[in-house]
Image (spheres, coloured by chain):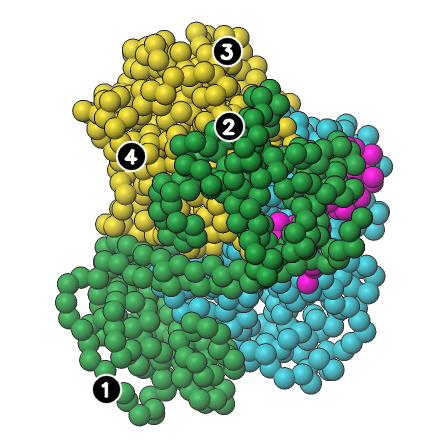
Chain colours: A yellow, B cyan, C green
Amino acid sequence: MGAQLAAVIGTGQTNHTAKRQDVSMAGLCREAIDRAMADAGTDWSDIDAVVLGKAPDLFEGVMMPELFLADALGATGKPLLRVHTAGSVGGSTGNVAASLVQSGVHRRVLAVAFEKQSESNAMWALSIMPPFHMPVGAGAGGYFAPHVRSYIRRSGAPNHIGAIVAAKDRRNGALNPYAHLKQPDITVESVQASPMLWDPIRYDETCPSSDGAAAVVIADEQTAKGRPAAWIHATAMRTEPTTFAGRDQVSPQAGKDAAAALWKQAGIKDPVSEVDVAEIYVPFSWFEPMWLENLGFTEEGQGWKFTEAGETAIGGRLPVNPSGGVLSSNPIGASGLLRYAEAAMQVLGRAGEHQVDGARVAVGHAYGGGSQYFSLWVVGSERPGAR
Amino acid sequence: MSEVAVVGFAQAPNVRRTPGTTNGVEMLVPVFHRLFAETGLSKQDIGFWCSGSSDYLAGRAFSFIAAVDAIGAFPPIMESHVEMDAAWALYEAWVKIRTGEAETALVYGFGKSSAGELRRIMAMQMDPYLVTPLWPDSVGVAGLQARLGIEQGLWTEADMAEVAAASRRAALSNPDAQLSGETTAEELLKQPYLADPLRAHDCAPITDGAAAIILASGDKARELSERPAWITGFEHRVDTPMLGARDLTTSPSTIAAAKAAGVDGVQVAELHAPFTHQDILLRQALGLGEEVRVNPSGGVLAGHPMFAAGLIRIGAAAAEIRAGRADKALAHATSGPLLQQNLVCVLEGR
Amino acid sequence: MVTISSEPLSAPLNVGFDYTRSLGPVLGRFATGLRGHTIAGVRGSDGRVLVPPAEYDPVTAEKLTEFVDVGTEGVVQTWSWNAQPLDGQPLSHAFAWALVKLDGADTGLLHAVDAGSPDKMSTGMRVRVRWAAEPVGSIRDIECFEPLDAEPVERQPVVGDDVTMLTTPIHLRYDHTASPEESRYLRGLAEGKLLGQRCPACDKVYIPPRGSCPTDGVPTEDEVELPDHGVVTTFCVVNVPFLGQRIKPPYVAAYILLDGADIPFLHLVLGCDAAEVRMGMRVRAQWRPRDQWGTTLENIDHFEPSGEPDAPYESYAQHL
Ligand SMILES: [Zn+2]
C-alpha cells in the first residue's frame, strides 16, 4: 500500500485578459489544454481521465459546464470529474488529478481549470444576498479587507508592505507573456497613490478580473521517468468552517494544518531554506505576508519583514509569485491550477523570463471561501527521496 | 493496492419538501449522527470527507460551504467537494483511500430540489449557446428519448408503467421512500400524459434529501462491519453532450463503465433512472437478465433527491450485500441530460 | 424565555443576470448564418454533418473546421408534447419538442415544433424553419419549426457584421428558507430583540444561532438574549460601487461583537466620520422606527459610537 509516484509532464495556460471575446468557453479551455498536451508531448489516446475545476457555476451561468464541454475537454468516452472547492479549486483539481495517478487508478490524467469571468460579473455573483441578511457584503475585497486590517494590527506591519507586494508581483507579471496585467513601471509609490477601494485595500493591491484557463498533464512513474518532469513530492488539502466562535481569520488553522502535513509528506524540515520558489494565492497584496506566516515560511508576525527585505522578489531568499501571481491574472477557478502549473514550470526550468535560477523544489498554493479551503503541493525536479 | 468497502449508510427521509435550508444542514446532522452511532466512529476518526451538491439547485454561489457546518469541522478536516452527484464524491474518496492517505472516508450528498423550479433549472445543464436559450425542460427532453425507444420497439408505455408500479411496490419496504403503494400498470396507464409519451408516473418525483456513506479500507472495514460491502469495480464515463449526435436509445458510457467494472454475475442492481424508460434502457445496456433483482429500494422513481440520489443507489446496493441478501451487487449513478454521464460501482460480500 | 415560534421563515430569492457569451469562430459562424436565414453544420471526423455545429469532434476531440450549409427543412426524428410551456421556451402555447434532422444534416437539432396539437405530430413528418421576427444571431432566430402545410410567415433575414457575442438572460426563482434557529432569531428581531443561542457542547453563544454549531455539529440550543451594544472587532471602508449593491458607498462594514456573544456579525457603522472608526470602538444599535421592523437584521439601521472608552485589544483579539 502507499501512494505511487506521479509527476507533471506538461503545463499550459491561456493568454489571460479581462475579456477573451475571441473564444467560447470551449475554445478558452482548449487553448490551455492544447499547450499542455504539446508541452507534454502527449496525444488524446494517452489521456485516461480528465478532471475539471471551476469556481461557482453562477459565474458563467452554466450548471456543471463540464457536461457541455465533454467533447472539447477530450473527455467523451472517458472518466470526467468536476471539482469545486471555492477559490482553492484550481489547486484541488491538481490534487485530485494527482491522486488518480498516485492511487494507481490511471496512468495519465489531464487536469483543467478555467473561469470566463466576462460572461457575467463576479462582484454580482459573490454578493447575491439571500433574504433576511444585512446587505453589507461587497464581494471578495469587502470580505477580506477587515481581516487584512486585523493582520496589520496584530503584526504591527507598516502600511506600505501591501504596496511592496503589489509592485513586485505586477513587475513580475511583466516578465510573463501570459499575464493579464503587465506593469513594468509600477512602483510602491504609485500603488500607494491608487484609489482606496476597500480600506485598507487599494486598487493596485487588488487582483484583476480575468478570463483564462490552465491545464497540466500528470503521469505515472513509468511515463515520467527519463524525461523532464516535475515530480509531485506532496499534496495537502484542509477545510474549516467559514465562521465559528474564536476562529482565527488572519492565520486560519486549516492553512497551518495543511502546511504542516505538506512539509511532513515532502520531508521538508525548514521550508524557507529548502523551498526554492513559491507560487502562493495572493489576490490582495497583504496576503503574501499573511500566508508566509500561515505556511510556516516565517514566524508569526514576521512575514511582513521578509517581504519588506525583498526576500520574496526574484533573486531573494524565497521568490514568491515570479509569474506575477493572482495579482497579475485572476481567472478565479483557474488561479490555483496556475499556481500549481507555475511551480511545475519552475522546477522544469520552463518559466522563461521569470525563471528562478536553479529552482529544484517549488510550492503551489491556493485558498478559497472565507480563507477556509486550502490546497497545496510541492513539486521537485528530482524524484521524492532523491534530494 | 488497498481494498475499500462500504461500512455505513444513512439517508434522510425522501420528501417533497423539507422546511430546511438549501445548505442541507438540517438533513445532514441527523444522518451523520445515525452513521456514527451505527459504526461507532466519531468525526475525529474520519480521514477524508467528500461531498456532492449543486449551487444552481440552491440558487447561490458556494452553497456547499455552509454544509460543512453540519460536520463540526474544527479541528480542520481533509475535505473535498464535487459539483456532481455524491456518487462521484464517493469515487474521489475511494481514490483517496487507495493512495494510502486515508483509512476511512465519509461521503455525503444533499439537495433541496423544492427550492427552485427543477425542470427549468435542469435546462442549465445543456449547451449554453445552442440549447439552454430554448429552456428545454428535463421532462420534455426525456420524452424525446422515451418515444425513440417506443417507436423502435425497445419498450412500450405499458412496460414503462410496469416499471413505475414495481418501483412503488418495492418502496413499501423502504421507510425513507417518498412514493410507494400497491398499484398496477393498468391503473397507471389510465392517467393522462404529462409530456406525451410520458405520464407523471414515468418521471421521478421532486425530492428533498441527503445521504451519507462511510468507506473504510482493509482491516479497518473488517473491524467496523461484520460483512463489509467490498468495492470490486468502480468506473465512470461520459458521452457527448450533443443529444442529436448520440444514440439516445442506449448508453455507451454505461456500457463502457460496466465492462470495465466487471458486472457479470450481479444478483441485484440499484439503477439511477429518473424516468421509467431509462430503467429499461439501462437494464438492456447492462445486459441484466430476469434473474437480477432491480431496485429493491424502489429506485429514484420512489424518491429522487438530486445530488444524493446516485450515492443512495450505492448505499442501497451495499445494504443488500451487508444484509447478506446478495453476494454481488451493482450500483449505478447518472448525471447530465438523458443519461449523459454514468457511473457503475460493483460491490461484493465475502 | 420569549415565546417565539421557530417555524422556518422563507422568502423569494431571485437570481438573474444577462450573461454575455463570446462565441468564437464556429458558434459565431452558425449564429451569423442564422441571422441571415442559413444554417451551418460542420463535418465530423466520422463524415457526419453535425447540426448545430460542434467546435470539437465528439470522437477525436479535434477542432472541426469544415462547414457545410444544410437545408431549412427537415424531418422529425422524435418528439414530445409540451402542454404547458415554461418561461423562456420558444412558444407560449402548447408545442412539441423535437429533434429535427435538417436536409443535408446527419444529426438532430433540438427545437420546438408549432403543430397545434399532439395528433398533428408524428415521427418522420417534414417540418420547416419559421424564422424569428427580429433575428440577432442566436438559436432563437429559429422561432420554431412548423409543419409544411402551415401558412408560411414572411420574415426578413439580416445581413451585417459577423455575430461574435450572444446575450443570454438567465432568471431563476428560488424559495429561500431560514433554519429553525435562524427563524427564531429573525422573529426576535421583529420584536426588537437580539436572540442568540448557546451551543450545548462548547458553551459558545452564537448570534445568529445555528442549525449546527460549526465546531461541534450539533444545533445551538439555550436561548440567550443579547444587548444591542458591543465592540467593533475589525472593519473595512467600502468605497467601491458594484452591480446589485444596496447601500450607497462609501460605508463602513464592521464586525460587531455584541457584549455576551462569542462571534461577531457584519453590520454598518455610521454616526461618525469613517476615518474615526477603529478596532475596539464601542458601538450601539440605532434601530429603525418600530413600524418598519420586519424579520431582518436590517431593523437595526446601523451601529454608532456609544462614546464609551475603547475596549482593550486583548478583550477581542481572539475574535479576529
Ligand atoms: Zn459548539
Which mark is drawn over residue C154?
1
Q: Amino acid at mark 1?
A: Glu
Q: Which residues are magenta?
A: B17-43
Q: For marks 2 and 1, give the CA distance.
A: 69 Å
Residue B44 placed where, x, y %? Answer: 73, 28
The total of numbered circles placed on residues is 4
Residue drawn where x is 43% and y is 80% of the image: C92
- Disc 4 to disc 3: CB gap under 8 Å: no
Closer to the eye: label 4 or 1: 4
Residue drawn where x is 35% and y is 57% of the image: C19
- Name the residue tied to disc 4: A195
Q: Nearer the viewer, residue A210 or A351?
A: A210
Residue A238: within the magenta?
no
Do the residues at pointers 4 and 3 share their chain?
Answer: yes
Q: For marks 2 and 4, give the CA distance.
A: 22 Å
Residue B330 showing in the rendered view: no
Residue A86 placed where, x, y %? Answer: 49, 40
Q: Chain of mark 4?
A: A
Q: Amino acid at mark 4?
A: Pro
